[in-house]
Amino acid sequence: MRLKTNVFLISLITAFFSQSVFAVYHQAVSVATDKGEPVQSATVSLSIPGQDTVTVKDNSKEDDDDRIGFFKIPVADSAVGKKGTLTVTRGGSVTTQAVVVGKTIEVSIASASAPPRSRSGGEYTVDISRTDGNTDTSLAAPFYNGGGDHLELTQTSFGIDYRMPLGSNPNMFWGAQGRLFIGNGAEGLNLDLHPTAGRDTFLRYQEHFAAMLYAGMILATMNEYNLSLILGARATQGKVSGMSDESGGGGIRNHFSDVERSIQPSLIMEVTGPKCEVLSSRWRAGVALDRNNDHSVNGVSTLGFDYHFDMEDEWQVRTFFGVIF
């Protein structure tokens, strides 16, 4: 009798485990963005009361179905018909919904074109950039009226940017940016007008600060990369200086300078990328066309000569790379 009882218990335990452990049901989960784009990379977790949470970190690669955005989560057969909680994590976005195992499960998550927002609804970017320009220069003086060498401006700058969504459309945004330029600017003109040895007359320009208000829109999204177009109004402050060395003719080394401010347009193409493991943050990079106003400075030397230095307006090219916080 005892032997029969043991055999019965063993059979019961074996049947229980064969049904609840070894019999596996694959729950299909379809994940797409709110734009209908299938999601290729995400973490999908299914939690069922009384059972361990099962997590799948990438699309299933079964021979019979390798569709993008199609996940298969293995659960025990006994879980079919039970209620559970499905969690989809992609980047900084987490989507949770109640599900019933055995039924078709479709999940819609926010598209990558809607960038994660901070508590205040905006985000900060710190960047480093390089500005390159090439502009015509000229001088008007009693003994010379004409142009000289181009002023080839190359300056490095550091910027901080604050950006927020514009209205309810996640593809539209606006922001403000401040920029500090470093370096000594560049010289142009480079004329030899006096008995002083070598070239003695120069024009120098150095940009100091820039501030910009802008609006932009996301033009295209591919996986977690966004391509954006931005149009801004850029206020700048810079110093323009003219120098003419008359020491070879009985005069001195004359310096004339003026601080000038202007508001000009800026056109930017920008790429925003996903979180980089090295930086532990998302990033931005792009190229900007910044309009630089014409600048001039006047002065009278100790020998009584009138000088009028001028540099033409131009479009400067600025490339940048920034980290998003």
Image (cartoon, helix red, strand yellow):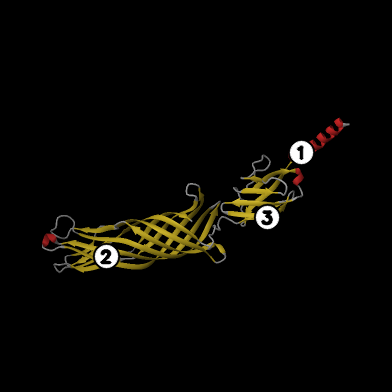
> For mark 2, what is the residue?
310
Q: Quadrant of the N terminus?
A: top right
Residue 228, percent from left and from top: 49, 58
Looking at the image, which residue is at 47% across and 56% down? Answer: 270
Residue 280, percent from left and from top: 49, 50
- Among the two numbered marks 1 and 2 on one chain, the one whose residue lies closer to the N terminus: 1
Identify the image quadrant of residue 293.
bottom left
* Residue 55 appears in the rendering: yes
- Among the two numbered marks 2 and 3 on one chain, the one whose residue lies closer to the N terminus: 3
Callout 1 amino acid = Phe
Outermost residue toward the front in this view = 2
Q: Nearer the viewer, mark 1 or mark 2?
A: 1
Tell me the CA gap for discs 1 and 2: 89 Å
Looking at the image, which residue is at 36% across and 65% down? Answer: 236
Between residues 185 and 25, which one lies in front from this camera angle? Answer: 25
User: Label 1: few (<14), some or many (≥20) within 10 Å?
Assistant: few
Tell me the CA gap for discs 2 and 3: 66 Å
Work out whether 10 lies above or below 279: above
> For mark 3, what is the residue?
97
Relative side of 198 to 27, left or right: left
* Residue 69 appears in the rendering: no
- Among the two numbered marks 3 and 1 on one chain, the one whose residue lies closer to the N terminus: 1
Relative side of 251 to 130, left or right: left
Tell me the CA gap for discs 3 and 1: 29 Å
Between residues 87 and 168, which one lies in front from this camera angle? Answer: 87
